[in-house]
Image (cartoon, helix red, strand yellow):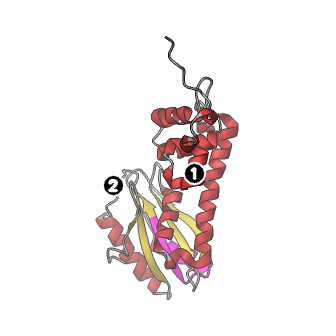
Amino acid sequence: MSIPIPSPHIRDWPAAERPREKLLARGPGALSDAELLAIFLGSGLRGQDAVGTARGLLSGHGPLRTLLERSASELAKLPGLGPARACKLVAALELGHRHLSAELERGEAMSDPHAAGRYFAQRLRGRPHEVFAALFLDTRHRALAFEELFHGTLDGAEVHPREVVRRALAHNAAAVIVGHNHPSGNREPSAADRAVTARLKQALALVDLRLLDHFVIADGPPVSLAARGWV
């Protein structure tokens, strides 16, 4: 008696199990990382469906965040991707960055403080060295510009409050949100992080500018120093 071989085609699966149909019926949040990646891939490697190929990518080169932090040239070398899919994947990620940036431009940096934290996370997470950046806002707390101001070693970046003030004045900003990443993955703000925050707040106040928040980006959700009462 022969054992039936599973079809390598997702179209032969029961409708409720197909990633696209599941997304349409239940929304993207109902899909696993592999199923979301499979929708992007469209098809799998020879003899394998797209979900199987996606699982292989995540198993061998993931998890998802690690996979998506690769450059287009690095992604192009992975099985199941290649140059065309790698470029599309990186472009899709950039669309996500710009969508979140558009949210901030509509004034959501303060009406939804988490939006600013997510934006910093998307821009800074996964960097091999510490990067300190600033989001400059107008009087209605809409985004004017985002700049990476200081780059450091694996352990830290030296922050100069005077330069933050200079760039804020150049953008005619009324308020500033800053953030930096911890390449170690440790989310907890250090004593140095708190000291820099205090110095920045004082320097900006001298020219009637407000420091609204300071985010630490590491593993897990962004940490808001303002939420802890340190801004």
Secondary structure under the numbered disc 1 in the rendered image: helix
- The residue range painted magenta reads 163-179
Q: Give the x, y percent position of residue 119.
A: 52, 64
Neighbours of disc 2 within 10 Å: few (<14), some (14-19), many (20+): some
- Residue 54 versus residue 6: which sits nearer the camera? 6
Decide if residue 26 is on the left or right side of residue 40.
left
Q: Give the x, y percent position of residue 180.
A: 44, 62
Give the residue type at disc 1.
Leu
Going 59% across and 31% down the picture, which residue do you hit? 49
- First of labels 1, 2 by sequence position: 1
Going 40% across and 82% down the picture, which residue do you hit? 202
Going 55% across and 81% down the picture, which residue do you hit? 141
Quadrant position of the C terminus in the picture: bottom left
| Label 2 sits on residue | 186
Q: Does the magenta stretch include residue 169?
A: yes
Q: Which residue lies furthest to the front in this view?
A: 1
Disc 1 to disc 2, C-alpha distance: 34 Å
Decide if residue 82 is on the left or right side of residue 51.
right
Q: Which mark is residue 203?
A: none
For the question of whether residue 32 can be seen, the reply is yes
For the question of whether residue 72 can be seen, the reply is no
Q: Residue furthest right?
A: 84
Q: Which residue lies furthest to the left in this view?
A: 191
Up-down relation of residue 35 to residue 98 (above or below) = above
- Residue 105 versus residue 161: which sits nearer the camera? 105
Decide if residue 45 is on the left or right side of residue 182.
right
Give the residue type at disc 2.
Asn
Q: Residue 23 carries which label?
A: 1
